[in-house]
Image: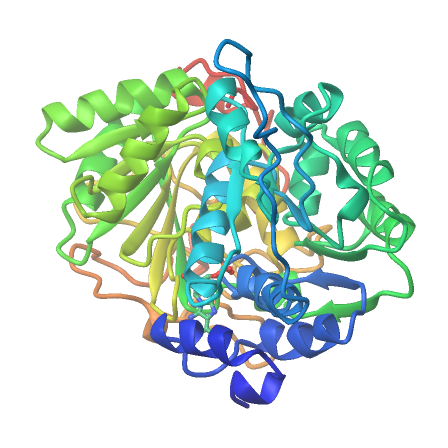
Amino acid sequence: MSFEALGLHATIVKAVTESGYTVPTPVQEQAVPAAIAGRDLLVSSQTGSGKTAAFMLPALHKLVSADVVAAPAQDASRGRNERVRFTAAKPKMLVLTPTRELALQVTTATEKYGSYMRRIRAVSILGGMPYPKQMQLLSKNPEILVATPGRLIDHMESGKIDFSELEILVLDEADRMLDMGFIDDIEKIVAATPAGRQTMLFSATLDGVVGNMARRITKDPMVIQIASNSNRHENISQRVHFVDDLSHKNRLLDHLLRDESMDQAVVFTATKRDADTIADRLNIAGFAAAALHGDMHQGARNRTLDSLRRGQVRVLVATDVAARGIDVPTITHVVNYDLPKFPEDYVHRIGRTGRAGRNGLAISLVNHAEGMNIKRIERFTKQLIPVNVVEGFEPKRSAAPARSGARPGGWKPGDGRSAAAKPGQRSFSKPSAAPREGGYSRDAAPRGPSTGAPRREGSGGGYRGTNPRSADGSRRSFGDN
Ligand code: AMP
C-alpha cells in the first residue's frame, strides 16, 4: 500500500515522501481513506504508531481539495490611534491535545505535511504562551488550530474564536485529556462546534468514560483498533532492577546512563522537585542533563526539547505530563526513577523510546515495597517485566517473596521470567529485540538459591504497603507534575 493509493492529494504525497515515509503505518492505512470519505473515527492506537499523520493527512487533503482561502481576522480599517479590532478567527480544523508539547509536535507535523500546500496555516494555542502573541497568531485567521483545552476556552469566552465554520475536530490522546480533568472543557468546546463537523478521536483506550464520550460526540463512527495493550512496544525491552534505598538507586542510575549503548535517555520522576534535583546531580556527575516539568515556562520547555532533539541534552529528567508526546527517535533508554501513578502512564513513558522503528530499553528502578505497582503494570500491559541485576549493584534484600501458588492475576511467580520457562508458559522477554547490553551481568532474572525460581518481588502478597516512600526514604507526592 502506498500513500498515493490512499487517495491523498499529490502535494501531500510529495511532502510525506520527503519526510522519509515510504509506506503508511497500519493506523494510517485504515484511517486515511475512511477520513477522506468523511467518516467519523474512533481510533485506539499506541503512541508512536503514526497517529498524527493518520488524522492530519486526510484533514489536509480535505482542506486542499476545498481550496480553503483564509482572510485575515484582523479588521484592516483601523485608524492610526485606534487599537487593533479583531474579528474572531474562524478555523476549519481544531486539534485538541492534552499537553503543550504534544500540541507543538502536532503543529510541526502539520507544517511538514502541508509544506507544499498554499495558504494553510496551523497555529498552537497553549497555556503558558503570552496572550498578545496568541492574539497575533489568531489575527491571521489560521485554518488549523492545535490547542490545549484550558487556554482555548479562554479565547472562546473572550470572543476571539468562532467555530461556526469548523469542519474537522480531532481529539488526540483523549483518554489523557480526561485523566487530566478536561472533560467539562471538552464538552464546552464540542458544543461550540457545528453538528455537521467530522470528528476523529484518538485514545489509548476506547473503554469506560472515554468510550462514552467518544460515542456521544461522533456520528456512526468507524472504530479502528490498532494495538491492544498486549502487543504494544514489541521493540522495547523492559527491565526491573530492585534497589535497596535512594543511594543504591542513584548509583545504579549513574551506571545505567554510562552504558555505551545509551544514546539519549529520559528519566522519569514523580515530582517536579525531584526532576530538578536529579538533573542537577547528573550534571555535576558529568552528564549533559536537563529537567522538564510543568513549572517551567513554555520558552524554557521548548529550548530544552530543542536541545534534546539536537543531541545537546543526553539525559532528560522529566515528569509525566511534561514528557508526554516527546518524539525524539534517538532516545534509546527510558528509566523510571519513580514508577508512574497509573499503569497507562507506564505505557506512555516507555513509548518515548523505540520510536520510528528503532529498538529501545525501558528500565524501572523499583524498591522492595513497590512489587504490587509492578504487578499492576504487568496486568495492564499483559506483559511480564523481567528482573535484572547488574554486577556490583545487587540489591541486599532478596527479591523473592516467600509465596507460592496461583496469583489473582492468573499467573504464577516465575512465569515468563525464567529462561527455562515451560512450554505454554507466557514469556514476554525478548532478548533478541534488545539494544546492546553492555554492563548487564545477567539477562534473565536471578534465581533463588533453593527453588531455582527467579528471585522476584512483585508477584502478589507479602507486601505491607505499596507506598514507595516508606522503603527508600524519599518523600514525594504522586501526581505532582
Ligand atoms: P506519532 O504516532 O504520530 O507520534 O508518530 C510517531 C513517529 O512515526 C513520528 O516520528 C513520525 O514522524 C513517524 N511516522 C509517522 N508515519 C510514518 C510512516 N508512514 N513511515 C515512517 N514513519 C512514520
Side of 253 where 288 appears, left or right: left
Q: At x 71% / y 18%, what residue is drawn?
A: 158
Query: 160 or 452, which lies in front?
Result: 160
Q: Do we see residue 84 in this rendering?
A: yes
Where residue 235 sits: x, y (%)?
41, 68
461, 259: nearer the viewer: 259
* Residue 320, placed above or below residue 413: above
- The single residue placed furthest to the top in the displayed view is 81
In percent of the image, x 48 and y 48: which residue is there? 107
Q: 397 and 476: which one is in front?
A: 476
Looking at the image, is 243 positioned above or below residue 261? above
Percent position (x, y) of residue 129? 47, 23
User: Looking at the figure, which quarter contains the N terminus?
Assistant: bottom right
Q: On the rendered structure, is 112 left or right of 72?
A: left
Instruction: Where is residue 42? Give x, y as percent.
Output: 77, 61
Quadrant for residue 155, please give it: top right
Q: Residue 176 appears at what percent x and percent y?
A: 65, 40
Q: Residue at x 53, y 59 (%)?
A: 384
Residue 267 sits in quarter: top left
Q: Regarding ligand 1, which quadrant of the image does it lie in?
A: bottom left
Say if residue 340 shows up in the picture.
no
